[in-house]
Every structure is written in C-alpha cells, then in structure tokens.
C-alpha cells in the first residue's frame, strides 16, 4: 500500500517535466540543427507523445501536473493543496532546466556549427534563431527568420492573448479528460492520449505566433539555462522583452480561465451518477489502451492524471471505537500532507460521527444514510465519486454501520470488480471491543446482548482480513489474553493486533500490517440472513437533533453529563442493555462529546464549554435493545427532567426512533474477486 509522500510528489513532477521537455525540446533541436524532422506537425507529434509518456510514467507519484499553470488551476477548482504549489512549481522548473542542460551536453557541438553556418553571434541580435531551441519568442523565428519580422507584427499583448487562449484550451481538455463520468473514472492511459492529442491540435494553430509554450516551467527552465549558456539578454528579457507577461502570466491566467469554463459547464450539465439505477459492471473493453497516434507540440505541454485513491474500510460492532480510529488517522494523514476523505454510514440521519469528523475535516466528510453500505451501495459509490471530484484524495476512510456484517461479499467484492481503476482497497479491518468479543465467543460468559445480536459480532469477525482488539488502555491484560485465545479458536488464520485508538498506541503497527497484507476482501462469511435480520431488528435506533436555550449562563458540560447518566439510569431501571449511545453538544467553537457502550459501563465525556454561552445544539444517537417508540419516550423523559433542572428549553429539529429493516444488499458475491 503506497501513498504519494511529499518526496515522491517532488520526484514525480521533476522527472515527469524532465521527460516532457527532454523529448519535446529534443525534437526542436533535431528539427532546427539537423533538419531531421520536416514541418511543424512532426515536431509537434513528438511533443504530444512526450506529454503522454510523462503522464503515464509519473501520474502515480504526483498526479502529473507538469505545468505551473495546471497546478494553479487545480488548486483553484479541484482542491489541490495550496501549500504544495511552491514545491510543485520548483520541481517542474528544475526538471525543465535539467532537461535543457542535458540536451546542451549532447547537442552543444551542433549548436555551435549551426551558429557558425548561419552567421549567428550568440547573445547578439538575431541569435534568437538558435536560442529558440530553449526559450520561446514571438513571432516564431523559425517562421519569420528574425526577431519579430517586423516587431509590430505581433505585440506583447497579442502574444499574451495567444498564450492565454492556447493554455485555456489546454486546461479545458485536461479538466475534461481527468473528470469523473458517472461511475467511471478515467484511466491514466486515456488521460495521456486525450491531453497529448488535444495539445497537438492547439499547437498546430498557435505555434507560428508564439511557439506555443502554454507552460511557464517549460519556458522559464530552459530560458534560464540559455541565459547562463551565453545567450544573455537575448534569453532574458529577450529582444522584445515581455517574456514574463507572455509566457508566464498569459498561461497562468489562461489555465484558470479554461478550468473555470469546464467547471461552469460541468455544473450546468445533467448529472450522471451510479446512484441512479443499476451499477454497471466493468469489462476489459472499458479500459482504453494507448493507441499509436501522432501528436504535436512545438514548445510545451503538461498533464494531469490521478492515481487511484487508497480506500480503507474499518468495520466492527457498535461502540468498538471506529470513529475515534478514523479521526486519529485522518488527522495524521493531513499532517503528512495527504488529501483525506471520510465516509460515515448509518440507518438514519443526524449522525454524531459525521458531526465529529466534519468539525475537524470540514468539506471532506460524506454521509451515507438510510441503510448500510451493502444496501445503499450506489449511494456509497456516489459519496466516493463526490469526494474524488472535489478533493482527489490520496486516501478515503470508510466506516460502515456497526450493526452491519457481510461487508466483504456485498461491498468489497463489488468495489474490487467494478471500480478497480478508481480505488485500491486496503485489507478489511474489524475493530473489536474486548468485552463484547468475549461475550460473543465464550458461551460460559454471561452475555448482556441476545444471541442473535452476538451472531452479528461473530460474522464480522469471520469476514475480516485483519482483527484489531481496541481499548487496550481500558482492558486488563487478562481480558486481552482471553480475547486473543477465543479469536485464535474461531479464526486461527486471521492476524490479530492490539491497540488503543484513543491514545494512538498500536496504530502504527496496525497501519504497517495493512501495508504488509496488501490484498483486501480475502474472506467471505456464510451469513444466515434470517438470523442477521433478527439481530438488527432487536436494536432500537434513536437519532435526535435539538436546539437548546438557557435563560442564564449554563455549565453545559455538567448538563451533558447529567443527561447521559439520567438516560442510562432510566434504561438500567428497565433492565435494558445499551449497545451504544453517543452525543455531541456544541456552540460556537466549544464542544462536549460523550458515549456509553453498556448499561453498566461508566460514561465517557470529554471537552469543555464556555459558561457564558446560553445557546447550544445537541446531536444524540442511541442504539439500544428496546422498541424504538419506548426508546424515544425514555429519551424525551430524561431530557425533560435534566433540562428543567438547568432551566433549559429544547426545540426539536429532528427526533426519529426506528428499527433497521431487513438487509437487502445491492450486490452479493459468492466468491472472492481476484485482482491479478
């Protein structure tokens, strides 16, 4: 499992731009110095092929921008991280400079002979006829035989407009070629071909005017080299000046304009989504090969193509700690410079999990509500597509409903077969609460949950690629050892790790093990859907969203603590077991969050509040062995009691009690899908 680390991104942009410029400028060297290529189209064809090869070779490292103008446009419209722009631009300019230096090492003798034969004095007026093999000039000296033939034939403004228009067309093609289409994401090969061919057509029109640069790095890197190699002021600022306006500012403005036009047209076009109707199956004919086609380019291209996102699915029963783990990993990935997306899942809406993750990763969280991933598979695909189009994430973290099982057969296998070009699936991890695990596996232990609910826990364990015993900081060593022994008896071939998602202990070992295992969805459990449905139906679900108002400043942390404890007491007095209860109370930047994983378990509450606040909002999710209408009544009664004591009024935005329907997955695969 590989992520595009910052050093890989720099290397990708440097090497990709080097390939692009080395072969593209190499064609110009051959055409100018040795008459080896005939006409504009042949030179341009090499440029186009060079672009395609550079994209194909380096897309997995950096996304293959290979052009500062494209990098800026991607930051403006597709969420590419602005802090990375400087690194990308430096890598692109360095790659172009090194390509020019390498070509000079090879062709230096031919350049001198060409200059002698043409009576060119390097650095003097007219030496742009040899300098043009590195930097660009307007009009094209190869077309007019001199610096501007005459200079008034193309003004600085006209040249800037030409470069801007050409780059706008190029950016539009790049955005279109790399855009998601319904459930299909373009392959690197299709992007390479489309961009190379599109650039060829653009160059065939603009090259006589400005040499068709369209790429500030391709222009400035070789231009800087030629300045140092003796062309001096003919290279910078050039015989007419204006190289910055024409070849740097023009492409930057053009790319932003071209990308913006594509975004505008995309937003006004009818949306095509996998959530509308049946999800199509992929076939080998869906993957476009790279045909042998001519391309063109007289002075520079670029490209963008996206590596597949790493998709990490973490399952486990209610209260196992999945959200805590995903938040920890998302925070860590972001600090490492990676783009992260998250997908939450529940039978209902107004999720505490979504609210918690959105608070620290705003705009990067999508929620699949109204059913589990298996039953809402098109919605899951739609959420993944939306994250991809908006963020182009390196990694997407997904958390299925805690009462759901059969994930491998109904989610992982379809993703592997239908979307293998878009996503690389990490091994499926199931997170375990040690006490719940012992309940499910040890018949001699007094269970707090009924057998048909514990059946779901066992099925989750049996389908996992990797099992992780969580909450190691809270459980005794004896409990952890007992848990390991029971797991070894049930699934002896499944790796088992221990961690504390809350403290971070063991998280590194988990992620290293994911990378070592490599392949996802290697086990499909045999699931009795009647038993599975009975287990889910035994749980009452409650999702509440309330606005709270106090007549005077309130200790909101104490209010939240008392509400959770009162709710627990009410259920305990009825001998009702809690599977999981969690809440998040917020106002402004202050939050208090808490959870319960059992009727006899001590509540966990964290956070603090400014006591001067008199308004707050609370999300409250409960999963309890109780009929939904009775559960809702208990919550309302508990809330009324505690709110009265604090002189708080509650306005209900959403209060919904329900039981999950029978699982009806969109897909169910009987065997493991091989990616070989």
Image (cartoon, rainbow, N blue to C red):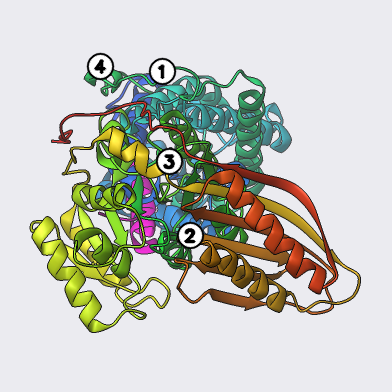
User: Please, what is the dominant secondary structure of the magenta stretch?
Assistant: helix
Residue at the disc numbered 4:
285
Quarter of image, res 507? bottom left
Pointer 2 or 4: first along the chain: 4
Give the alpha-carbon distance from disc 2 to disc 3, as whole Å: 15 Å
Front residue of this view, candidates 489 and 150: 489
Q: How far apart in space, not on screen, are marks 3 and 4 (Cα)?
A: 43 Å
Label disc, if present, on residue 576 of the rendered structure = 2
Q: Mark 1 points at which residue?
A: 278
**Residue in the foreground of this view, choosing between 130 and 30:** 30
Q: Residue at x 29, y 33 (%)?
A: 529
Instruction: Residue 670 in the image: state x and y as whole percent.
Output: 18, 29
Q: How far apart are marks 1 and 3 (CA)?
A: 27 Å
Look at the numbered discs 1 and 2 and tell me whether their residues touch, using CB distance below 8 Å. Answer: no
- First to last magenta residue range: 1-24
Q: Does residue 605 lie above or below 522 as drawn?
A: below
- Tell me if I can see residue 206 in this picture: yes
- Numbered disc 3: secondary structure: helix
Earlier-in-chain disc, 3 versus 4: 4
Judge from the rendering whether residue 18 lies leftward or rightward of residue 361; answer left or right. Answer: left
**In the image, residue 431 lies at what x, y percent?**
31, 60
Q: In which quarter of the image is the N terminus?
A: bottom left
Instruction: Point out the frontmost of discs 2 and 4.
Output: 2
The residue drawn where x is 59% and y is 34% is 138
Q: Is residue 637 above or below residue 174?
A: below
Marks 4/1: CA distance?
19 Å
Kindly state the secondary structure of the residue where label 2 is placed.
loop
570 left or right of 642 in image: left
Quadrant including the C terminus: top left
* Marker disc for residue 537: 3
Q: Can you tell which of label 4 and label 1 is closer to the viewer?
A: 1
Residue 248 is tagged as none
């Amino acid at each position: 499992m590989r992520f595009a680390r910052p050093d890989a991104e720099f290397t990708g942009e440097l090497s990709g731009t080097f390939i692009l410029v080395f072969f593209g400028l190499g064609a110009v060297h051959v055409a100018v110095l040795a008459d080896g290529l005939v006409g504009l189209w042949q030179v341009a064809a090499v440029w186009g092929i060079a672009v395609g090869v550079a994209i194909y070779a380096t897309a997995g490292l950096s996304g293959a921008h290979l052009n500062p103008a494209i990098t800026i446009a991607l930051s403006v419209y597709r969420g590419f991280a602005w802090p990375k722009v400087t690194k990308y631009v430096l890598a692109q300019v360095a790659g172009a400079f090194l390509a020019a230096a390498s070509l000079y090492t090879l062709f230096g003798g031919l350049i001198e002979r060409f200059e002698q034969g043409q009576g060119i004095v390097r650095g003097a007026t007219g030496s742009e006829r040899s300098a043009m093999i590195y930097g660009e000039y307007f009009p094209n000296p190869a077309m007019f035989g001199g610096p501007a033939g005459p200079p008034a034939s193309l003004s600085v403004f006209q040249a800037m407009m030409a470069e801007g228009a050409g780059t706008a067309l190029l950016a539009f093609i790049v955005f279109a070629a790399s855009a998601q289409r319904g459930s299909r994401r373009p392959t690197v090969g299709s992007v390479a071909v489309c961009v190379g061919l599109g650039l060829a057509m653009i160059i065939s029109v603009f090259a006589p005017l400005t040499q068709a640069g369209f790429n500030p790095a391709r222009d400035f890197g070789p231009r800087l080299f030629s300045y140092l190699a003796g062309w001096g002021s003919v290279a910078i600022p050039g015989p007419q000046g204006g190289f910055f306006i024409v070849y740097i500012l023009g492409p930057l403005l053009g790319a932003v304009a071209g990308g913006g036009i594509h975004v505008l047209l995309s937003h006004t076009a009818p949306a095509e989504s996998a959530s509308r109707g049946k999800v199509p199956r992929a076939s080998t004919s869906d993957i476009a090969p790279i045909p042998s086609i001519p391309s063109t380019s007289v002075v520079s291209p670029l490209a963008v193509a996206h590596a597949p996102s790493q998709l990490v699915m973490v399952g486990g029963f209610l209260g196992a700690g999945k959200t805590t783990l995903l938040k920890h990993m998302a925070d860590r990935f972001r600090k490492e410079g990676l783009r992260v997306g998250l997908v939450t899942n529940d039978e209902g809406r107004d999720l505490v999990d979504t609210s918690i993750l959105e608070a620290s990763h705003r705009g990067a969280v999508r929620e699949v509500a109204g059913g589990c991933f298996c039953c809402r598979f098109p919605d899951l695909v739609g959420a993944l597509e939306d994250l991809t189009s908006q963020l182009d994430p390196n990694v997407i973290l997904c958390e299925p409903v805690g009462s759901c099982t059969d994930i491998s057969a109904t989610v992982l296998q379809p993703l592997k077969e239908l979307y293998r070009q878009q996503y690389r699936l990490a091994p499926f991890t199931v997170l375990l609460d040690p006490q719940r695990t012992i309940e499910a596996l040890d018949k001699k232990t007094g269970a707090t949950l009924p057998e048909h609910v514990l059946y779901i826990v066992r099925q989750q364990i049996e389908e996992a690629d990797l099992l992780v015993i969580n909450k190691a900081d809270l459980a005794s060593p004896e409990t952890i050892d007992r848990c390991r022994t029971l797991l070894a008896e049930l699934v002896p071939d499944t790796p088992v790790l221990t961690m504390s998602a809350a403290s971070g202990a063991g998280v590194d070992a988990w992620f290293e093990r994911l990378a070592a295992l490599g392949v996802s969805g290697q086990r499909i459990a045999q699931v009795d859907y009647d038993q599975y449905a009975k287990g889910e139906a035994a749980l009452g679900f409650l999702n509440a969203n309330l606005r709270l108002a106090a007549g005077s400043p309130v200790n909101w942390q104490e209010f939240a603590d008392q509400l959770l404890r009162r709710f627990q007491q009410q259920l305990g007095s009825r001998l009702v077991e809690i599977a999981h209860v969690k809440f998040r109370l917020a106002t402004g930047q202050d939050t208090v969050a808490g959870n319960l994983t059992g009727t006899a378990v001590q509540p966990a509450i964290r956070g603090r509040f400014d006591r001067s606040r008199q308004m707050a909002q609370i999300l409250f999710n409960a999963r309890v062995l109780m009929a939904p209408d009775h559960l809702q009544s208990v919550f309302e009664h508990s809330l009324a009691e505690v709110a009265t004591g604090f002189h708080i009024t509650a306005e209900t935005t959403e209060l919904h009690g329900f039981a999950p329907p029978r699982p009806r997955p969109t897909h169910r695969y009987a065997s493991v899908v091989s990616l070989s």
